[in-house]
Amino acid sequence: MALTLQEKKEIVSEVAAVAASAYSAVAAEYRGLTVAQLTTLRQNARKNGVYLRVVKNNLAKIAVKDTAFECIQDGLVGPLVLAFSQEDPGSAARLIKDFKKDKAHDKMEVKFVAIDGKMLPASELDRLAKLPTRDQALATLAAVLRAPLDKFARTLAALRDQKAEAAGVSLD
C-alpha cells in the first residue's frame, strides 16, 4: 500500500522532530527478522526511551536534513530500522546490542551509529552502548563532587581527635 503525500509529510515531520532532540542514532538492517521479533524490539525500545522506526530511506534522508544526523544520509541504504536515543546517548546502542545477544535475533546487522554529527562504523556500537545513563552520570558527578568534602571532613575529625588527645580529653 503506497503512502499518500500527507502521510509522507507526517512521517518526515515526526522523524525530523525526534532527530532534532535525539542524542544518538543506530541504523540496523532488519532483513530476516519476523514480525514478532520486531514487535519485541519495539516494546523494548518504548521501555528504554528509544524512538524506533522503519522509514523509507528517501523519507529518512529528508527528515534528518538540517539536524545533527544529516551525516547519516549516505548510509541510508537497504531495509533499515532507525533507533534514536532520547534519554541518554547510549540507550539506542544498548537496545540493539541487547537485542542481538539472543541467537534468534542474529540476523539483525548494525550498519552504522551516529553521535555528535558524526556517522561511525557499526564497530562503534559497543563503545556507544557503554556510555553511562543519565542517572549513572549524575551519580558519578555527585561522587566526584563529594570526594573532596569527605576528605575535608575526615581531616577535620582527625585534627579534632588529635587536639582532644593532646588535651587529655576523651570524645567517647
Image (spheres, rainbow, N blue to C red):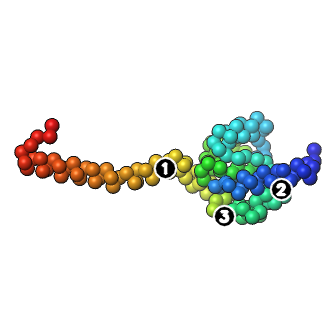
Q: Residue furthest top?
A: 36
Mark 3 falls on what kind of element?
Answer: loop
Between 128 and 70, the residue placed more toward the observer is 70
In the rendered structure, find residue 138 and report the number of the disc placed on it: 1
Between 159 and 114, the residue placed more toward the observer is 159
Q: Give the class, few, some or many, for how many residues have Cα within 10 Å of label 2's Cα (few <14, many ≥20).
A: some
CA gap, disc 2 to disc 3? 19 Å
Identify residue type, mark 2: Leu
Identify residue type, mark 1: Leu
Residue 19 in the image: x percent, y percent? 72, 55
Whether residue 137 can be seen here = yes
Residue 48 in the image: x percent, y percent? 63, 42
- Which quadrant does the N terminus fall into? top right
**What residue would you read off at disc 2?**
59
Mark 2 falls on what kind of element?
Answer: helix
Horizontal side, residue 28 vs residue 166: left or right: right
**What residue would you read off at disc 3?**
117
Q: Earlier in the sequence, mark 1 or mark 3?
A: 3
Between 17 and 125, the residue placed more toward the observer is 17
- Which quadrant does the C terminus fall into? top left
Q: Give the class, few, some or many, for how many residues have Cα within 10 Å of label 3's Cα (few <14, many ≥20).
A: some
Residue 92 in the image: x percent, y percent? 65, 49
The residue sitting at 49% across, 50% down in the picture is 138
